[in-house]
Amino acid sequence: MIISSQSVYIANAVKRAPTGALHVVIADTKKQAYYLASDLDNFFLQDNLFYFPTTTEKSEYKQNTALLQRTAALSAITRWDAGVIPGLTGNLDGSYEITPQLYKKELVPSTLIVTYTEAVQERVLRSKKIRDSILTLRKGESLSHAVISDVLFEEGFRKVDFVTQPGEFALRGSLVDIYSFADEKPLRIDFFGDEIETIRHFNPDNQLSMGEALREVSIYPNLDSIGQDAEYVGFMDVLPKGTQIWDLRKDILEKEEGNILPQPAFAKNFELLADDIVKKQIEGYTVTILSPNESQTRRLKEILRNVKPLFLPLSLHEGYIDNASKNCYYTDHQIFERYHKLSIRRQVEKAEQMTISDLNALRMGDYVVHIDHGVGRFGGLVRVPQGNVMQEMIKITYQHEDTVYVSIHALHKISKYKGKEGEAPRLNKIGGGAWERMKERVKSKVKDIARDLIKLYAARLKEQGFAYSKDSYLQQELEASFVYEDTPDQL
């Protein structure tokens, strides 16, 4: 059975189910589960869909992501277990057909968890203990920082200066930052005295708040390491009564295997693709090309304008032919043998710019550059009194042991020094003009370059232009069949 057809079948069944329920999809391997979760991402909002992996990941980034995904899935099970679960009656009627109702993302009264054999064999915390370990915070609630700290310490959270990964919390003045194991972004709780005034998510890279204010949040610890006295049971034992199990290890789908065939190989050959579409249309099939890229869709529509297939902005892992409904779903990445980028919910993001984690990785004495003061030595994170509160600052030492303290919110002004290996840079002097003069020289050179460019383009404007012909069919084919997806700049 083709994985993408299974995901379409399950999505149809869940959306057509007469009652909401908890659905658990069990694939045979991690790879299959990953493909299924990525495909189902096309059809459901984040609050509906969860991925439950194992805990056996090597890198810290993957470990944090796996813990977050597992905890989020277990929290969904706990919410269902706490309520009244309606039993499902009869068989769910599914289809391999992609209908408008199917690819319309909406909040449905059901929850899906995608997992695999190895993951369900690991033991998990019993639901009652999960509920007992949740810290719920509400706007307007009165609660002291000491109480929050005690609860978080008890649940295994680690106190740090700045929160950058799940399982950490920080206290700074009226702010309490917490990175729950069930959220993609950490939470910032702002107090007025002992009363919770606002709750927001924030970006750990720049420590700035983001998104709308929340009225209530649930803080989840690492549910895989609660403590020795915690009771761990099999994954299937925590599923509430009435859970719909989709055990793909047994291939529970009821339709005949021969009804579903894999997408043919076209080897980037447009003529072969067009001939196949015409043939299928003559036989009464509807051919739909799945392409999430708008530019690629425009190219394909122009190239295939004579055969006129349908197009949908979906990204399935593999295309297929459904002989029962007479539908062909072809993916553009398979047509052009292009790498398919998967989409899995709840990833702990890797930072692309200097972050608190990068700052923590600096060693005492490392050379850094401040945009306003120049080259200095990193002196660590220190606490400096600011009025009636203590604030964490970055210490940078310059010539003559002069010191500058930089707010953590001005992290964007600091970078690690990059120069010739083995050569120590000359420290700048605070209050001296050397750094400013250097910046002025650079600005002057940039202005010279800009002036030359302006002259060049002014000369070009005076030249008689040559109008090339409109892009040909071959140009469109070349662009459409390029092995990589367009970057934002190319678009």
Image (cartoon, rainbow, N blue to C red):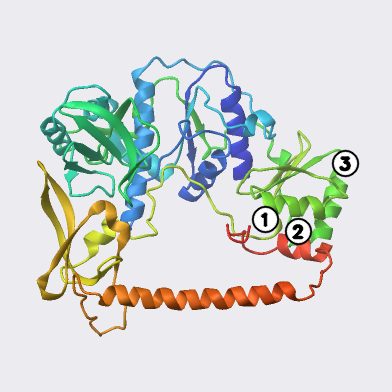
In the rendering, which numbered label is found on residue 266? 2
Amino acid bearing label 2:
Phe
Asked if 437 appears above or below 76 in the picture, the reply is below
Dot 2: few (<14), some (14–19), or many (≥20) neighbours within 10 Å?
Answer: some
Q: Are marks 1 and 2 in contact (CB under 8 Å)?
A: yes
In the rendering, which numbered label is found on residue 334? 1
Q: SS at mark 3?
A: loop
Counting from the top left corner in percent of width and height, residue 287 is at 78, 43
Q: Residue at x 28, y 45 (%)?
A: 166
Residue where numbered disc 3 is placed: 283
Dot 3: few (<14), some (14–19), or many (≥20) neighbours within 10 Å?
Answer: few
Asked if 81 appears above or below 64 in the picture, the reply is above
Amino acid bearing label 3:
Glu
Counting from the top left corner in percent of width and height, residue 479 is at 72, 63
- Near-viewer residue (379 or 183): 379
Left or right position of 299 against 143? right
Amino acid bearing label 1:
Gln
Q: How many angstroms separate mark 1 from mark 2 (CA)?
A: 8 Å
